[in-house]
Amino acid sequence: MLGVVAAALGGPEVLQVTELPEPEAGPGQVVVRIRAVCVHPADVAATTGEIPRGPDVPPFSPGWDIAGEVVSVGPGAADYTVGDRVVGMIPWYTTRGVPGGYAELVAADTDWLVRLPDQLDFVSAATVPLNAQTAHQGLSLVSLAMLPAGSSILVTGASGGVGGFVTQLAVQRGYRVLAQASHSDEQWVHELGAHEVVPRSADLSTVGPVAAVFDAIPLGEAAAAAVEDRGIVVVTRPTPAIVPARGVRQELQLIRLERELLADLVGQVAAGRLRTRVAATMPLTEAADAHRRVLAGGLRGKLVLTVG
């Protein structure tokens, strides 16, 4: 089979398309024929050695979020049969790229996968697991979940993958969402249900004060300036500490795979209760160029590699 591996740490040029042995389904595993795999900034960071809990030594394969079809079933994997459509997340923080999703076939633990509803296509499905779970888990932190309905939340990067799901899920919970949008992307954020759109160029210290900030970019101090004293800031990467005298609680949200949660979120996207968007698709063999496009920025939605 064909796969894409990072032969060394570095930029997109380290990604090589190569022939790899076809995987076999071990106990509790199925082999999935990949139809779509999402390209995340985390994939780019992995190849440069900048991702927390990333692999120490190449070669390895990037790729978290996969969608495809089951082609073989291992012992103890009776939940699935050949031909089942599935979507899932390789817990890359434990596999460290062995396996990763940039391949034609992947041997996946059944705990990584959920069934893909017929009304949801492979490409759209592949944009859901990492971003939507991160959004939900960040919003479900105890202090944030206890905010009364009607509380104001600022979401940075609301036109991005994580931020877009945060915006929608926060609206579902009854919060008043102030969503920061990229230039000329305000309409998309409005359509996600945001009560107010904040320009990317805005001085966030003039916004609010709000009860909570979900800093999905993250901006760090610039976003924290919007939160009220004794409020909460959720970030997706480590940021500088907020002045202790303010009593602001900082929470670092790192993804963890929750199968039941993933099934619910995929179901909501399939039913139209949550929205996602795809900027473009590219063949798996053009993974290096896909990384270049992610680095260049300006994408309106996720970039997805397709197979077959």
Image: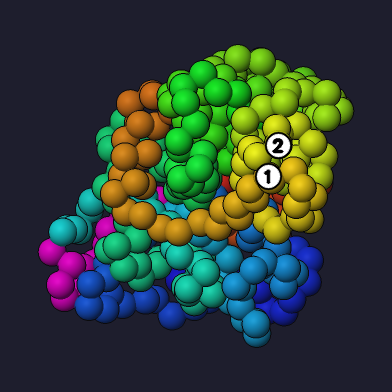
Q: Residues within 10 Å of mark 1 (few under 14, many from 20)?
A: many
Q: Are marks 2 and 1 in contact (CB under 8 Å)?
A: yes
Rendered view: 129 above or below 164:
below
- Residue at 23% of width from left, 51% of height from top? 84
Q: Which of 55/85 is in front? A: 55
Q: Which residue is mark 2?
A: 229
Rendered view: 138 above or below 65:
above
Q: Is residue 36 visible?
A: no
Q: Residues within 10 Å of mark 2 (few under 14, many from 20)?
A: some
- Residue at 75% of width from left, 63% of height from top? 12
Question: Which span of residues is magenta-colored?
Answer: 67-78
Rendered view: 27 above or below 78:
below
Residue that sits furthest to the bottom in the current view: 57
Q: Is residue 68 magenta?
A: yes
* In this picture, residue 173 sits left or right of residue 242: left
Q: Which of 117/83 is in front? A: 117
Q: Which mark is residue 76?
A: none
Spatial distance from mark 2 to mark 1, Cα to Cα?
6 Å
Residue that sits furthest to the front in the current view: 245
Q: Mark 2: which secondary structure?
A: strand
Locate residue 300, reporting x and y percent: 68, 32
Instruction: Tell me which numbered mark, 2 or 1, is placed earlier along the sequence.
Output: 2
- Residue at 29% of width from left, 49% of height from top? 260
Amino acid residing under circle 1: Val
Rendered view: 140 above or below 103:
above
Residue 209: quarter of image: top right
Q: Mark 1: which secondary structure?
A: loop
Q: Which residue is mark 1?
A: 248
Residue 190: quarter of image: top right
* In this picture, residue 32 sits left or right of residue 163: left
Residue 23: quarter of image: bottom left
Locate residue 135, reporting x and y percent: 52, 42
